[in-house]
Amino acid sequence: MAGQMSWGRAVRAVPFAIAAVVVAPAPAVAQDGSVCVPIDQLTCGCDMPTGLGDPYPACFIGQVNLTNDRQIDSFSARAFTALHWPMSAKMAVFDAGRTPAGDYTTVLDGWKSTREIFRADGKAPVAWEDDTRVLPAACTGIDLAAAKARVGFADQIPAVLQPRLLDESVTPQGNVVIDAHKRRTRYEIAMNWQAYDYIAENRLWDAAGLDAYLSEHGKIDFPGGDWNPQTRGAMVAKMAWMILGEGDRPEAFHKSWAYVLAPETGACSVEPVGLIGLHLAFKMDGNVNWNWASFIQTAVAPVADPAGPLPTGGAWLFFDPTGSGPVNTKPDPDAPIVPARLVIDPGSAGGYPKIAGDDPTAGCQDWGFDYACFNRHLATDYAGSLIANYRLLGTQWTDYSGSSSTPVLTPSHLANATMESFIQPTSSCIACHATAKRPSDPLGSQTFDFIFSFADALPAQN
């Protein structure tokens, strides 16, 4: 999330010929003007006790009532569990009749990918309720049944939705993050209903529509969540996925099927993938810089000071404890492909030592505001669910409470080893995304409201 560019800056190494698709008009979700509709997952419309220590585990508030680290982390925590609740038959709407057990299609899986919003063929966004994928020509004609049949754990992979498209494998800093099997990490960006609707309603997916809107309004201004009345604001997720194969433990991941595009050859294949990293940005009224939460799968890498001493044991996806090379070091682009050797730098994990383990600590209370123990709750309250495989790294937010007129970023740095792998000590979500604008706009204008994806808007096509 830090560096020269960030979310939405597509890196396509091969020509992207678009397959023909039939797309229904957008949008397709009815909003009746009232609050508490199911797709918003607001607590006022969510009455579903489950015995998980909280009466509303599939819902969360629209805005914190006090902006501080305890309440911001509380929001991040509840958002993560709610968005990883089982999805119902309606797109991105939680299933009130289910509790999280095993793996399943999540609410977050139902969010709309930016590939279906800012389409490479210049057409209108795919309708919200439609899970059609806008695919490159190389991905059409693949026999899905045959592709899935070759995977021994296919029956463990949710298949309610069409396979997602993963065509990006280069970080915004121009790096490739290689796992222990010498496979590229893949990235995807998705938006919730509020962000999608704002873009579709204002025709911001179209380059001409975007310019017209900016000429009239000066900048993009996504809706923010509110406390009273409860209102859901715009949310954007960036996900890091790894291809699963021989030797991996599929039960340790939230899984999906994906069309995977090889940048070297342009070939496309259908692969099983596992979620390894997540950035979750959420906007609330009064906090114009958004808030940026980060989560990581437990086996990605150990928490350790890069200067040493380094762990000598454990089985990690991006760290070989028997290796001798430097850690968190950008690979030589001219060298043979070798797995990244990563550790989670505690200085870039929001100062959250709770990431280090699952041991219950003295004083941990029930959910409430005691989110210093949030990762303990993930590991214990959700045992047997995909949710238990992930941990909160931290949330970056803006503190306006000081005597100085200058807002303070809290924490000053935040990174996810699956994305900001080689720049962890200097990574700042807010500082980076504050530069999202058109090339012609002045520095500091924040024209794109912290979301780089608007750079992918193309002239509309019929």
Image: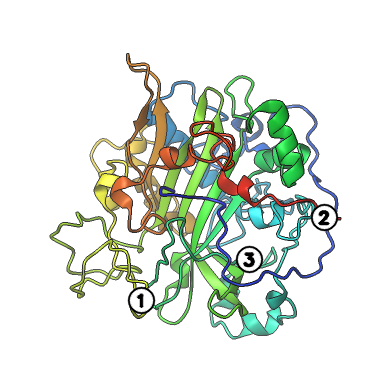
Q: What residue type is labelled 3?
A: Leu
Residue 417: image location, x then y, percent: 36, 57
Specify the farthest residue to the left.
309
Specify the farthest residue to the front.
440
Residue 219, image quadrant: top right
Q: Name the residue under label 2.
A: 461
Above or below: residue 160 compared with residue 75 = below
Residue 402, image quadrant: top left
Task: Compute the Cα span from label 2 to label 1.
Answer: 40 Å
The disc label shown at residue 334, or none: 1
**Label 3: which secondary element:** strand
Count how many numbered circles sit on residues in the image: 3
| Residue drawn 74% across the image and 68% down it | 18
| Residue drawn 44% across the image and 21% down it | 66
The disc label shown at residue 165, or none: 3
The mark closer to the camera, 1 or 3, is: 1
| Residue drawn 81% across the image and 65% down it | 21
The 10 Å Cα crowd at callout 1, few under 14, some 14 to 19, many 20 or more, is few
Q: Earlier in the sequence, mark 3 or mark 2?
A: 3
Observer-nearest of 72 and 90: 72
Drawn side of residue 393 relative to residue 24, left or right: left
Q: Which of marks 2 and 1 is nearer the N terminus?
A: 1
Locate the C terminus by quadrant: bottom right
Task: Compute the Cα span from label 3 to label 2.
Answer: 21 Å
Judge whether residue 53 can be spotted in this image: no
Q: Which amino acid does label 2 sit on?
A: Gln
